[in-house]
Image (spheres, rainbow, N blue to C red):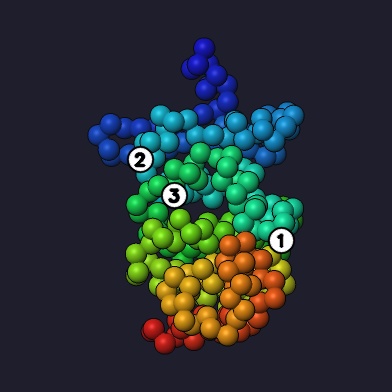
Amino acid sequence: MRHLFIFYFGLFFIFVVNGQEKAKWDFPVKPGTEEWKKFSSVAEMYATCQIPEEVLNQLDTESLMELCLNFPAPPLFPLFNSPEQAFLEYYSHFNGIKELFKRKDVGECLLRKYTSMNMNDFSFLWPLHEQGRFVSKYKFIEAILSQPQVISSFDGNVRKELLKEAVRKMDEKIEKKDVFGGFSLEINLWTIVNLLSRENEAVLQGHNQQNLRTAMETGLMIDIDADMLYQQAKNFVNEKE
């Protein structure tokens, strides 16, 4: 019965014992399919999207990261009171992200992925939902990079490179503000301030420290001089090069 259940939901899992091929798995039901439309609750959707435990332990970190970033129902940041609240809603309902945070090489994998993401791949010819998903992928990975338990796992070199890349991404988003604006810029800045604080907290002098702590914890840049914060990060990164 259990095998029939897995087959019915379209579970795909390949593992070759000799290690020549990676373990692979994909979400059995995805948005846009008839099966997805049949869900009667969010809880039912989350339950179906869990990675089976026997698969979870066999996935390498890079494959697991890709699954986390391609979760069928990623956080809808505008619907929550803060970016952190939106992320925690996702984190509390998906076993894949909890496992990802335990991996020792998560920093290197996130750095490779974040660096490889290219905003020039965006096209206004795409359907609106594809455009939205492209932009959301940046918010999603930056929300992951903003989590203290993730940042604390990075070694100094990974943290420095991620900060440099987050500043570069911010530069690109400002140039493409017709596509990347609002929440995308705020969450990018959330990543920057958390990484910068871990690198050199003294750089962040000049801000109200309570407001700064709130920004770091929630992702909300309330009463924060965003331009000043952004410039402090750029100056710090440029000085280190």
Under circle 1, the secondary element is loop
* 176 sits to left or right of 103: right
| Eye-nearest disc, 3 or 1 | 3
Q: Is residue 166 above or below residue 227?
A: above
Give me the C-alpha separation between circle 3 and circle 1. Answer: 36 Å
Question: Front-most of 110 and 206?
Answer: 206
Q: Position of residue 195 (x, y in %)?
A: 48, 69
Q: Residue furthest top?
A: 1
Q: Residue furthest front?
A: 210
The type of residue carrying mark 1 is Leu
Against 51, residue 97 (above or below) is below
> Which residue has dot 3 on it?
101
At 48% from the left and 74% from the top, the residue drawn is 196
Counting residues from the start of the chain, the first of labels 2 and 1 encountered is 2
The one nearer the camera, 68 or 124, is 68
Can you see residue 69? yes
Between tags 2 and 1, which lies in front?
A: 2
Amino acid type at mark 3: Phe
Residue position marked by numbered label 1 in the rendering: 125
